Image (cartoon, rainbow, N blue to C red):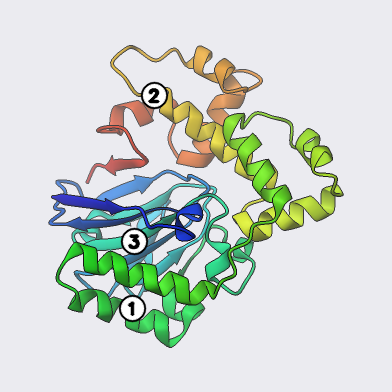
């Protein structure tokens, strides 16, 4: 398997975490559970113009979409077919980084996948064809870069209150949302609306996802995991509160997560 990443230059680098390309990815398992991160992504299947979005409770039920998708910010795990990752390319937006490229409040996309054609029209439909014609990875990244610049049309401006809040929440996801709201000088209702429109999740839900992600990151390493210590360090009231959130976001108990994962990251194999 070959995995390449590319970081675009200004102004896209302020909104895009990375562009990525996976080639020759053949997994021994059929499905993967993808943990929520609070970010949004464009994902384009170059092997087959098809993507299946599965019901996490019953993998026999799924929705079939085209191979070019915009993945909204999720608050629960998503199940993907590992075979569909064989040849894929995508854009991983930073938190609050997707909104300049789509003419709708991105909170309308919470917990959903939509085709690029639905949000970009003809350009979204043709983008996959252009990527297939490009032979080199660098050329594919340049095609994605140009597409984003066209869609933004110079609208590269974050609301200062949202940018400030994201910085605070990313450093300390257990921070009280009310305190940060007060510091922005906005009303609670106005702040929540602005934040959700740009980030895709409400401030409270975004913080819960980031706290979950912090807990997951603290389980990496060879030492046995002290779940009580993880819960305390991540700002949970108690271990029961921590387990409740972990199951809500991942669909797994913490101990089951440790047994099933094969390495760091947000992808956990599902045994056939």
First in sequence: mark 2 or mark 3? 3
Mark 2 lies on a secondary structure that is helix
- Looking at the image, tell me whether mark 1 or mark 3 is earlier in sequence order: 3
Judged by depth in the image, the label closer to the viewer, 1 or 2, is: 1
Q: Mark 2 sits on what residue?
A: 255
Identify which residue is drawn at 35% across, 72% down.
68
The spot of residue 29 in percent (x, y) is 19, 47
Query: Residue 18 or 89: which is nearer the viewer?
Result: 18
Residue holding disc 1? 127
Q: Is mark 3 on a helix, strand or loop?
A: strand
Q: Position of residue 229 (x, y in %)?
A: 51, 12
Residue 9 falls in image quadrant: bottom left
Q: Are marks 1 and 3 in contact (CB under 8 Å)?
A: no
Establish if 123 lies above or below 37. Answer: below
**Circle 1 — which element?**
helix
- Drawn side of residue 48 relative to residue 120, left or right: left
In space, the residues marked 2 and 3 are separated at their CA atoms by 31 Å
**Picture disc at residue 71:** none
Q: How far apart are marks 1 and 2 (CA)?
A: 42 Å
Residue pictured at 31% horizontal, 32% vertical: 264
Residue 85 shown left or right of residue 62 in the figure: left
Q: In this view, does 243 lie above or below 128?
A: above
User: Where is 247 relative to 110, above or below?
Assistant: above
Which residue has dot 3 on it? 90
Q: Nearer the viewer, mark 2 or mark 3?
A: 3
């Amino acid at each position: 398997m070959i995995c390449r990443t590319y970081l675009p230059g200004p102004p896209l680098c302020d909104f895009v975490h990375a562009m990525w390309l996976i080639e020759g990815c053949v997994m021994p398992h059929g499905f993967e559970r993808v943990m929520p991160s609070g970010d949004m992504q464009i994902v384009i299947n170059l092997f087959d113009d098809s993507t299946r979005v599965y019901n996490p409770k019953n993998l026999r039920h799924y929705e079939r979409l085209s191979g070019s998708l915009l993945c909204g910010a999720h608050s629960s795990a998503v199940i993907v077919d590992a075979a569909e990752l064989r040849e894929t390319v995508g854009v991983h937006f930073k938190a609050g980084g997707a909104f300049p490229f789509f003419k709708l409040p991105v909170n309308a996309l919470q917990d959903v996948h939509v085709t690029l054609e639905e949000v970009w029209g003809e350009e979204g439909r043709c983008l996959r064809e252009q990527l297939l014609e490009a032979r080199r990875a660098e050329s594919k990244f340049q095609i994605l870069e140009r597409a984003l610049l066209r869609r933004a049309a110079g609208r590269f401006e974050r609301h200062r209150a949202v940018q400030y809040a994201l910085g605070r929440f990313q450093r300390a996801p257990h921070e009280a949302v009310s305190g940060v709201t007060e510091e922005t000088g906005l009303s609670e209702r106005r702040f929540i609306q602005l934040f959700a429109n740009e980030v895709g999740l409400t401030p409270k839900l975004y913080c819960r996802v980031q706290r979950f992600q912090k807990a997951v990151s603290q389980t990496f390493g060879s030492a046995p995991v002290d779940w009580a210590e993880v819960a305390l360090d991540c700002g949970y009231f108690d271990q029961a509160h921590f387990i409740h959130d972990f199951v809500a976001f991942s669909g797994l108990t913490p101990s089951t997560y440790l047994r099933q994962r094969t390495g760091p990251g947000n992808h956990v194999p599902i045994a056939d």
